[in-house]
Image (cartoon, coloured by chain):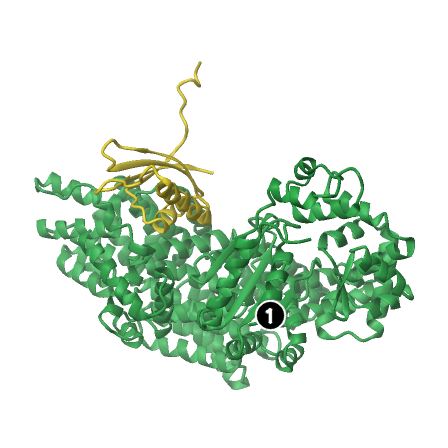
Chain colours: A green, B yellow
């Protein structure tokens, strides 16, 4: 069937390919319902592109648990050997991704890479798409990804990737519509079918139309499925039988496997191809459309289906199972009801998936095995439970992870393996902490120590000491952190347990930094270096998270580029939970530095995609609420209530203090300072106990603004202490030096007329409508005249949709600075500047800095006039 | 989905001519809104064309602001609203 009404889309694809050929690659998402013609469009494009480009196609499997990196495995099989080699061996995923990228970057011709059916993608493939999308700007490749948008609900794993991609400048979208009545009329010409009826019945879905026309019957079937069935009904009995076996084997069918399952197949296969059910695809055969295969499988009676899966399983096993087929074999084993085979292949498939960072798939493979685990010895059963628990933890399925961990613990008690029991307790403590169940977590950590201390010391005991040290660190108890940390470090160094050394140094360093001891940074860096040398990615990520915590708490914006580096590190690996935490801290930094547009993006991402019970939501909810409250936007209290609901039960300063301060500020902005005392009381007490300067100062300052007159405890962080002491000029000056424009304005609000005018103007510049109104009111009350009235919104409509930071970078570009110099001036990393520059070029639609600078002169003068 | 009134000020007046060009301008706004998941229902424009009151459906205020930014439109104030219909009480 010829492609109708797809011309403009082919033009768009070709334009992007030309751009890629000139060295500026991009990602395009092609979406539409099943049967809309995504594959047909891509194949047509691919055929025409082959003249000038290399075309690589990989498809995701419709398996309940897909192969990890399935599409890349497909692609590697037609590429040179290196990628396939890396995929076969136990290679860190990062290296696999980089090898693929460099093969794209170094190719003589441009490449078109197609990932089909992302709605079925495994987690590692989705990560690969993100990895590539961030790096395509300077690579001669066009990545095309297709998916059925109507099958991607709000909880679908693809959603989070789409959320991430939304911020990228090199991402394009192409949404395929249904065919028009005119197109349907053209297709129906000469078929004897009423075009109007055909259009009405098929709603213009091209696949449906093709099925109806090919079935050749007089009437029009009610559904796609009926249309496919009508065609199947015309097949001979042997052909149908072969088609069923092919359907069980999968989307792509190896003819030799097929004949091993059903006996000689040549004639029936020819019939299936002639009737358009299958098509030749090199040496293999494939279904013309997944909807055909779906219909065939639906039609199969369960006993026949089981029988076919058994036959496929037997044939595949006989030929030997390579690592990239483990997922498929585990699938056949389960469908065949063969428990032994499931226990043999599913855990192996899980290990493979986990090693490639497809943790969701790994968890699902373990779940598959656990269905048959009752027949296993209890210690092996417990291992499986714990391994699935860990994969659930990594994918933020916390409730499930806790339950699995508790079941494993019971089995450990049955077997009497106390070392493993202790280790299980420690693992459980960690997951409990992540969901805010702090006191249970502490209890489990203590139980672990008690149990393990009864035995000769080993790595488990050392790690349980370190866990205790982190329990105290999280409670911000410096002495406890130190005591347990020293004990852990002493044992770990004596017995050479690197992981424990890494963990402990992190706890100790973080605690010192929180209390303003600069040597903490050395410990944290040492921990991170050790982790990185030992390939302990999780611990590298943990160091980044704690740096993020410390940097936001102590307003150390000089550490901001560590956050950026951390986001990149975790984004390139499979450290999803870690990345969410870093994103939450970054949103706080962006808010504090006055980069509110960015803050809204980062915090919005966390609130939308972090697990419902995850404590990482707390800082992000606070940031989003403060943005709304300060801007005078609606609906900030529901966010603050949610934050309090999560943070309240933890009774920990790190969670409660930001919530208390945000709620105090929201009340203040609404002119309701009476609420502040009760909102801040608990957190203020905790801050006093912990002796933490920053939370102590911030909360004391809100209480002072609410006119609560009390003894200010010693040790409050300097800008707050100055403010409370009435030394607002110094406080404002210090906030300015630290780099917090909103806090600077808030400090000036206590000042004289010129100070108030500055505060007013600063609030207005930030778009802080609520605070601007407060400043104006105060000035009016003091009889100050000529207060600028109302907002001047044109200043806030950013030209060319550039963010405030991008405007700063652009300004420096026009002044002729190179990236390295810009990075130094803005105290960010070179890489961050690179990102800004490419984003600016994208938004301005220009190719070079010179062009950007020329555009900028116009833009910036417009900004100044406004 | 919540509904919002978005107030905007155009110091130099809102310049959308009733021509094909104006229609295209409006449609491009609709397209960019779709990318961020908000819907522009309709707007009221003051006589002097200096202020608009736009009715929007969207998931949250940040989406409304993001849409405004992408379209290069100013935002003074976002108010969450619900419909009050005078004939409801009859």
Going 74% across and 65% down the picture, which residue do you hit? A328
Looking at the rendered structure, the secondary structure element under dot 1 is loop
Can you say whether A187 is above or below B5 in the image?
below
* Rendered location of residue A221, percent (x, y): 76, 39
Going 38% across and 71% down the picture, which residue do you hit? A562
* Rendered location of residue A355, percent (x, y): 62, 72
* Rendered location of residue A435, percent (x, y): 52, 56
Can you say whether A211 is above or below A541 in the image?
above
Residue identifier under label 1: A50
In the image, taking residue B73 as reference, residue A533 lies left or right, namely right
How many callouts does the rendering have?
Answer: 1
In the image, taking residue B87 as reference, residue A98 lies left or right, namely right
Check disc 1: other Cα within 10 Å, few if <14, some if 14-19, many if 20+.
some
Q: Nearer the viewer, residue A91 or A285?
A: A285
In the image, taking residue A637 as reference, residue A537 lies left or right, namely right
Task: Classify residue A386 by image quadrant.
Answer: bottom right
Q: Nearer the viewer, residue A391 or A480?
A: A391
Q: Is residue A410 visible?
A: no
* Rendered location of residue A120, percent (x, y): 64, 58
Task: Classify residue A513 by image quadrant.
Answer: bottom left
In the image, taking residue A90 as reference, residue A301 lies left or right, namely right
Q: Residue furthest top?
A: B90
């Amino acid at each position: 069937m010829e492609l109708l009404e797809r011309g403009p889309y082919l033009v768009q694809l070709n334009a992007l390919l030309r751009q890629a050929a000139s060295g500026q690659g991009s990602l395009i998402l092609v979406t539409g319902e099943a049967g809309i013609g995504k594959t047909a469009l891509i194949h047509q494009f691919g055929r025409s592109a082959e003249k000038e480009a290399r075309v690589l196609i990989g498809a995701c499997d419709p398996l309940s648990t897909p192969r990890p990196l399935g599409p890349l495995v497909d692609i590697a099989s037609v590429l040179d050997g290196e990628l396939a080699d890396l995929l076969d061996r136990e290679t860190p995923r990062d290296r696999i991704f980089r090898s693929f990228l460099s093969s794209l970057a170094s190719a003589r011709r441009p490449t078109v890479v197609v990932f089909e059916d992302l709605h079925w993608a495994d987690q590692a493939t989705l990560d690969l798409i993100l990895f590539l999308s961030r790096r395509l700007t300077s690579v001669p490749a066009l990545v095309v990804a297709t998916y059925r948008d109507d099958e991607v609900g709000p909880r679908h794993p693809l959603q989070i990737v789409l959320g991430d991609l939304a911020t990228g400048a090199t991402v394009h979208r192409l949404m395929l519509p249904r065919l028009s009545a005119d197109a349907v009329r053209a297709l129906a010409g000469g078929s004897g079918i009423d075009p109007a009826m055909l259009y009405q019945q098929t709603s213009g879905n091209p696949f449906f139309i093709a099925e109806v026309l090919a079935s050749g019957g007089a009437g029009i079937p009610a559904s796609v499925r009926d249309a496919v069935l009508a065609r199947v009904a015309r097949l001979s009995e042997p052909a149908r039988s072969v088609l069923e076996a092919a359907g069980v084997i999968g989307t792509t069918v190896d003819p030799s496997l097929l004949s091993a399952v059903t006996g000689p197949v040549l004639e029936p296969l020819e019939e299936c191809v002639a009737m358009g059910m299958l098509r030749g695809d090199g040496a293999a055969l494939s279904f013309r459309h997944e909807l055909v295969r779906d219909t065939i499988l639906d039609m199969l009676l369960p006993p026949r289906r089981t029988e076919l899966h058994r036959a496929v399983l037997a044939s595949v096993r006989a030929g030997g199972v390579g690592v990239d087929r483990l997922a498929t074999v585990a699938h056949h084993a389960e469908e065949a009801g063969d428990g032994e085979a499931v226990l043999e292949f599913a855990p192996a498939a899980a290990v493979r998936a986990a090693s490639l960072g497809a943790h969701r798939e790994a968890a699902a493979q373990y779940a598959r095995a656990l269905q048959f685990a009752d027949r296993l010895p209890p210690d092996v059963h417990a291992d499986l439970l714990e391994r699935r628990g860990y994969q659930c933890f990594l994918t933020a399925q916390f409730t499930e992870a806790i339950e699995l961990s508790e079941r494993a613990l019971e089995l450990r008690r049955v077997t009497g393996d106390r070392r493993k029991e202790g280790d299980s307790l420690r693992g459980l403590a960690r997951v409990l902490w992540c969901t805010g169940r702090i006191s249970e977590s502490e209890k489990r950590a203590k139980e672990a120590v008690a149990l393990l201390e009864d035995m000769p010391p080993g790595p488990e005991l050392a790690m349980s000491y370190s866990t205790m040290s982190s329990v105290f660190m999280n409670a911000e108890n410096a002495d406890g952190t130190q005591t347990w940390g020293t004990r852990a470090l002493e044992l770990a160094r004596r017995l050479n347990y690197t992981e424990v050394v890494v963990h402990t140094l992190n706890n100790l360093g973080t605690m010192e930094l929180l209390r303003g001891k600069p040597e903490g940074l050395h410990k944290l860096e040492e921990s991170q270096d050790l982790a990185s040398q030992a390939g302990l990615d999780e611990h590298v990520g943990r160091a980044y998270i704690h740096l993020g915590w410390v940097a936001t708490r102590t307003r150390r914006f000089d550490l901001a580029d560590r956050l950026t580096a951390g986001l990149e590190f975790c984004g390139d690996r499979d450290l999803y939970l870690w990345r969410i935490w870093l994103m939450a801290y970054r949103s706080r930094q962006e808010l504090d530095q006055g980069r509110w547009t960015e803050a809204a993006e980062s915090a919005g991402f966390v609130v939308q995609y972090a697990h419902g019970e995850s404590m990482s939501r707390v800082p992000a909810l606070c940031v989003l609420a403060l943005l709304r409250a300060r801007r005078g936007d609606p609906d900030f209290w529901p966010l603050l209530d949610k934050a309090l609901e999560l943070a309240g039960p933890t009774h920990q300063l790190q969670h409660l203090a930001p919530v208390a301060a945000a709620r105090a500020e929201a009340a203040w902005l609404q002119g309701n300072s009476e609420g502040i005392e009760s909102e801040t009381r608990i957190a203020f007490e905790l801050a006093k106990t912990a002796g933490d300067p920053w939370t102590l100062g911030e909360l004391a300052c809100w209480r002072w603004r609410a006119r609560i007159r009390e003894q200010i405890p010693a040790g409050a962080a300097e800008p707050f202490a100055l403010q409370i002491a009435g030394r607002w000029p110094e406080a404002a000056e210090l906030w300015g030096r630290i780099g917090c424009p909103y806090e600077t304005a808030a400090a000036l609000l206590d000042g004289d007329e010129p100070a108030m005018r500055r505060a007013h103007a600063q609030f207005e510049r930030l778009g802080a409508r609520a605070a601007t109104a407060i400043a104006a009111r105060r000035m009016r009350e003091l009889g100050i005249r000529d207060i600028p009235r109302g907002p001047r919104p044109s200043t806030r409509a950013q030209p060319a949709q550039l963010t405030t930071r991008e405007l700063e970078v652009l300004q420096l570009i026009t002044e002729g600075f190179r990236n390295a110099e810009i990075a130094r001036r803005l105290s960010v990393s070179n890489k961050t500047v690179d990102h800004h520059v490419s984003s600016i070029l994208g938004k301005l639609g220009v190719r070079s800095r010179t062009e950007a600078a020329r555009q900028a002169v116009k833009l910036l003068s417009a900004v100044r006039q406004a | 989905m919540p509904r919002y009134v978005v107030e905007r000020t155009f110091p130099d007046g809102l310049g959308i001519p009733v021509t094909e060009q104006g229609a295209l301008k409006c449609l491009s706004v609709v397209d960019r809104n779709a990318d961020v998941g908000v819907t522009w229902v309709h707007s009221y424009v003051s006589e002097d064309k200096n202020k608009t009151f736009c009715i929007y459906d969207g998931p949250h205020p940040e989406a409304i602001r993001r849409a405004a930014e992408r379209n290069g439109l100013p935002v003074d104030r976002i108010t969450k609203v619900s419909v009050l219909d005078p004939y409801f009480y009859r």
